[in-house]
Amino acid sequence: MRRYALLATGCLNRNASFVRLRELGLAMAHRSIDVHFLIDDTEYNSSLTSQVSPATTHLITGGSRLSRLWQRRRVLESLRPQGVHILNPQPLNTSSVALSSPAMICDWDELLSVRQRPWWRRPTDLLSESYGRTRARLNVVASHYLQDMFHHRYGLSALYLPYAPYLPAIRRSQNPFTRPTAVYVGNLVPDYDHDLIIDAWEILQRRGIPIALSICGGGPLLDQVREDVTRRGLDRICIEGYLTGQALSDRMLHAHVLLLPIRDTPGNRARCPSKTFAYIQAQRPVIANPVGEVVEALGEVATYVPSSPEAFASAVEATVGRDLPDVSYPRLPSWQDLGDRLIESLEACRVFR
C-alpha cells in the first residue's frame, strides 16, 4: 500500500498555508493513497478531522516541544510511510523527520529566513532550510521565483506546484455595503503590506473621493491597525477582523474592487498569496502589485500598479463612479491536478515504487 504522511506543527487556526497541505493530501487520498495528517492537539486542530476525510488524522499531544517531537517520531515509526511531507522547513518539522527512514519531501511556499521574525530565529531557520533543501528526496515549490533560486543558486531541481482556488463554491447573497467599497483580505502581520492601502485611503480622503474600504483579516496587528485608523480619522475604513464563510464571500462578491498590495521583496517574490485565488473565485476586478505569483495567477486582466500608496490611490480613484463588471480570470489547475502532478513526481523519484 502506498502510504504518505503530511506533518504540520502548532495551531492551524487562520493558517493559510495549511490549506496547501490539506488540499494536496485530499487529492492524493482521492487516488487511493493511504494519507495521514500529523498535527498538534489543540482545540482548533481537533476540529479539522472531518475536513480531511478520507485521510486519517493523528493528534500529537504533549506539553513540551520535545515530548511532541518524540511522539511525532513514534507515530511515523508505527505508520512506516514511504514519504513524509513538510511545509517550509523549520526546526520543529525537520527534527521530526531527520535521520528517519521515510523519504522527506520539502514543500516551500515562502522562505521563513527572510520573514520579519526575532533575530535569534534566523540562524535556526537558515540551518533548517539548508538541511531541508539538501536532504529532501523531492523539493516542491509554490513559485517560479523559488524554482529558479533552487536551480541557479543551489543547483537543485524542484517541482513547481502553485496554489489553486480553495474556497467552496461561493454564491452571491445580500450586499453588506451601503456604498461603493473596496475590499482587502489578509492577515495583519508586520511583514505584509496592508499599510500601503491604509495610506492610500488617507490620500483618497484628502482628495474627497467617496469610496470606503473594508479590511477583512485578523492577526497580531489587528488592534494596532484599528487604533491607527481611528487616530488618523480615516472614517471610511472599516476593520472587519477575521471573517470566513458567507460573510467573507459577500464582501468579496460585492466589492467595487479587490486590493492586493505586495511589495517587491525577496520574501514576497517567493510567495503565492492564497488570497489571490479567493479573489479569482470572486471574479471582481483586482488592483495589485505585479510581484511573484500574483501575475502568474491573475494574468493580464488585473490592474497592476507600483507598490506605493499614491499608485493605489490613483488606481482606485479611476474606478469611482463606474459600474465595473465581473472579470473572467485565466483558468487555473485544480488541487486534484496538482495532487496528480505530485504523485507522478513521487513515482519518478522512487518514493512510490
Image (tube, rainbow, N blue to C red):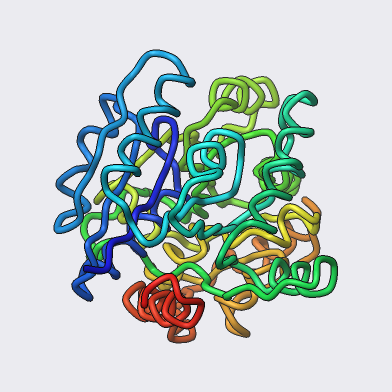
Pick whichever, 78 or 273, lies toward us. Answer: 78
Q: Is residue 302 above or below residue 250?
A: below
Viewed as shown, does residue 275 lie left or right of 194? left
Viewed as shown, does residue 269 lie left or right of 15? right
Q: Where the N terminus falls, by quadrant?
A: bottom left
Q: Is residue 220 above or below residue 334?
A: above
Residue at image point 58% right, 57% down: 109
Q: Residue furthest top?
A: 63
Pick whichever, 191 or 32, lies toward us. Answer: 32
Q: Is residue 202 visible?
A: no
Residue at image point 48% right, 83% down: 348
Q: Where the C terminus falls, by quadrant?
A: bottom left
Residue at image point 55% right, 43% down: 98
Residue at image point 72% right, 28% down: 121
Q: Residue 220's x, y, as percent?
A: 56, 25
Pick whichever, 212 or 188, lies toward us. Answer: 188
Across the whole image, how many numbered discs are drawn on residues?
Answer: 0
Viewed as shown, does residue 163 lie left or right of 150? left
Q: Residue furthest right?
A: 153
Q: Residue 235's x, y, as percent?
A: 57, 32
Q: Is residue 152 visible?
A: yes
In which quadrant of the rendered view does residue 156 lie?
Answer: bottom right
